[in-house]
């Protein structure tokens, strides 16, 4: 029986992007009680960015239930280029801790975002819906926009919008 947390290298983020969801925390359970939670041991250096869960900054020692392991977000600092790194452990349902500490790496680079947004406006329609209007200065390799809605902490797809021909 063992509980081992897995080292993770998340997808690269642009240092010009807003907070983005990163890869899920991960553990492997072999023949023991199921995974209960993760504990953040160290945080990325604040010169690289801020790690968030549910819109609030994560703190060292914070326990993250396994069901929220895929809800971490990272907001890179503008201009930072390098790797944002933090460490974490896990605990199973019996209270036993993982046999190791894992390293989570978020590469941050200076590539431009594929869409340069000029304006965005939301107008209430019938006190229930919204009409969204936006304009872009440039789009690179962009086929469509996915519009999502949230109710506090749960995001869901609302619609897909194709850009108008230029």
Image: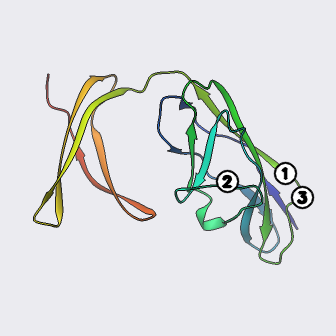
Q: Residues within 10 Å of mark 3 (few under 14, many from 20)?
A: few
What's the distance in space between the residues labelled 1 and 3, CA to CA?
7 Å
Q: Quadrant of residue 69?
A: bottom right
Q: Farthest residue in the bottom direction?
A: 94
Q: Which residue is rendered at x = 42% and y = 27% of the image? A: 113
Residue sitting nearer the eye, 127 or 71 = 127
Q: Which residue is rendered at x = 17% and y = 67% of the image? A: 128
SS state under label 1: loop
Judge left or right: residue 61 versus residue 17: right
The residue wearing badge 2 is 25
SS state under label 2: loop
Image coordinates of residue 93 in percent, x first then y, are 77, 76
Q: Which residue is rendered at x = 28% and y = 40% of the image? A: 145
Residue 99, numbered circle: 3
User: Quick check: 77 above or below 53?
Assistant: above
SS state under label 3: loop
What's the distance in space between the residues labelled 2 and 3, CA to CA?
16 Å
The residue wearing badge 1 is 101
């Amino acid at each position: 029986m063992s509980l081992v947390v897995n080292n993770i290298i998340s997808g690269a983020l642009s240092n010009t992007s807003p907070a983005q969801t990163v890869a899920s925390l991960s553990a492997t359970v072999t023949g023991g009680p199921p995974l209960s939670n993760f504990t953040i041991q160290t945080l990325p250096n604040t010169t690289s960015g801020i790690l968030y869960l549910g819109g609030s900054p994560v703190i060292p020692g914070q326990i993250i239930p396994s069901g929220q392991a895929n809800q971490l977000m990272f907001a890179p600092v503008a201009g930072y280029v390098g790797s944002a790194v933090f460490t974490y452990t896990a605990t199973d349902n019996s209270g036993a801790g993982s046999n190791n500490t894992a390293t989570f790496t978020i590469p941050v680079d200076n590539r431009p975002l594929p869409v340069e947004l000029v304006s965005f406006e939301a107008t209430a329609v019938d006190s229930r819906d919204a009409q969204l209007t936006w304009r872009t200065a440039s789009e690179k390799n962009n086929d469509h926009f996915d519009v999502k809605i949230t109710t506090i902490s749960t995001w869901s797809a609302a619609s897909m919008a194709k850009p108008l021909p230029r």
